[in-house]
């Protein structure tokens, strides 16, 4: 209604300069409640913008990552140039039942996979503790895991190996690592705060069990779960093509 009045004003004003006062009058002729009714007066909505009724929809942004964003996780000699990595800034559902914005660095060839999976997880309100670049922990894998941080790229060797980890290629991600620890064949974890999460299946917020929707969502884009490894299990770990 307001818009119509404004448009009428524009049309009239463009026809004749003298019509300005005349044209402006409809815009100001909004019905005013009687002065004797203060309750009505205060409840009259001034703004017509609808109030948000729920969490924002999922959003994701893929951008180039500058060298200075990876002060610890990338160095010369890594198997992938930082120019072939991308920063994915996306919405995730937190342990506090609220939406959050997180950051992940992955190889440019897998950004679609990651966005597809995390959109699904967000829409299902599947909770994630936190999501910062591993550089927030000086690229120390142990510290990042201990803080229950979800992260992807890190130019490091595979645990207990001299080979590059899939994380060094930006083609692996660790999710809720406290609830989903790396467990040796004998059932141990290096993290005290993860001891109660070494068995599967187990219940708990952010826990990944065999056949879970998280596992399925990754499987649909060709990423395998470390929880299916024989012997050692890496319940936090997903990687493109396995390994
Ligand atoms: Zn991993």
Image (cartoon, helix red, strand yellow):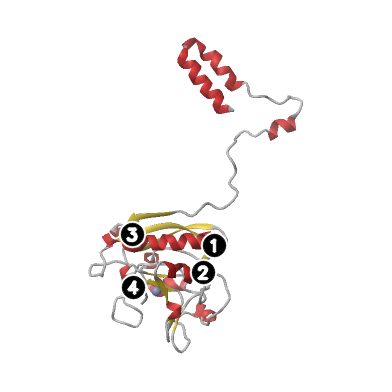
Residue in front for this viewpoint, 148 or 167: 167
Q: Is mark 4 within 8 Å of ligand 1?
A: yes
Task: Kindly report the distance in space between the C-alpha atoms of the residues bearing marks 3 and 1.
Answer: 25 Å
Residue 124 is tagged as 1
Residue 241 percent location from the top left of the image: 36, 73
- Screen quadrant of the C terminus: bottom left
Ligand 1: quadrant of the figure: bottom left
**Depicted 166 relative to depicted 16: above or below:** below
Label number found at residue 86: 3
Residue at mark 2: 213
Q: For the N terminus, which image quadrant?
A: top right
The relative height of residue 209 versus residue 43 in the rendered view (above or below) is: below
Mark found first going from the N terminus, 2 or 3:
3
- Label 2 to label 3: alpha-carbon separation: 26 Å
Q: Alpha-carbon neighbours of circle 3 within 10 Å: few (<14), some, or many (≥20)?
A: many
Which residue is drawn at the image coordinates 44% and 80% (left, top)?
228
Task: Look at mark 4 in the image and give the residue it sits on.
Answer: 166
Q: What secondary structure is marked by label 2?
A: helix
Of label 3 and label 1, which has the lower sequence position?
3
**Contact between labelled residues 3 and 2, with CB atoms less than 8 Å apart:** no
Cβ–Cβ below 8 Å for labels 2 and 1?
yes
- Characterize the local packing of mark 1: few (<14), some (14-19) or many (20 or more) Cα atoms within 10 angstroms: few
Q: Nearer the viewer, mark 3 or mark 1?
A: 1
> Residue 153's spot in the image, x, y percent?
35, 67
**Distance Cα–Cα, label 4 vs label 2:** 22 Å
- Describe the element under mark 1 as helix, strand or loop: loop
Seen from this angle, which residue lies furthest right?
36
The picture places residue 168, in percent across and down from the top left corner, at: 31, 71
Query: Mark 3 to mark 4: distance in Å?
Result: 15 Å
Q: Alpha-carbon distance for marks 1 and 4?
A: 27 Å
Q: Is residue 131 above or below residue 13?
A: below
Classify mark 2: residues with Cα within 10 Å, few (<14), some (14-19) or many (20+).
some
């Amino acid at each position: 209604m307001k818009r119509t009045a404004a448009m009428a004003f524009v049309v009239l004003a463009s026809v004749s300069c003298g019509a300005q006062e005349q044209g402006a009058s409809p815009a100001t002729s909004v019905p005013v409640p009687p002065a004797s009714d203060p309750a009505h007066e205060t409840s009259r909505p001034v703004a017509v913008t609808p109030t948000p009724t729920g969490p924002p929809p999922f959003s994701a942004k893929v951008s180039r990552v500058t060298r200075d964003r990876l002060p610890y996780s990338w160095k010369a000699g890594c198997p992938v140039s930082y120019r072939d990595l991308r920063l994915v800034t996306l919405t995730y559902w937190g342990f506090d039942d609220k939406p959050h914005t997180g950051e992940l660095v992955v190889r440019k060839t897998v950004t679609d996979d990651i966005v597809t999976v995390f959109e699904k997880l967000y829409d299902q309100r599947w909770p994630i503790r936190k999501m910062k670049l591993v550089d927030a922990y000086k690229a120390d894998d142990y510290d990042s895991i201990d803080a229950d941080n979800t992260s992807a790229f890190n130019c490091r060797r595979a645990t207990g190996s001299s080979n590059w980890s899939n994380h060094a290629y930006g083609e692996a991600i660790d999710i809720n690592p406290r609830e989903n620890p790396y467990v040796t064949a004998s059932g141990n974890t290096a993290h005290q705060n993860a001891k109660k999460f070494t068995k599967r299946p187990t219940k708990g917020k952010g826990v990944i069990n065999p056949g879970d929707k998280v596992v399925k969502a990754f499987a649909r884009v060709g990423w395998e779960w470390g929880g299916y490894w024989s012997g050692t299990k890496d319940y936090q770990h997903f990687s493109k093509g396995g390994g």
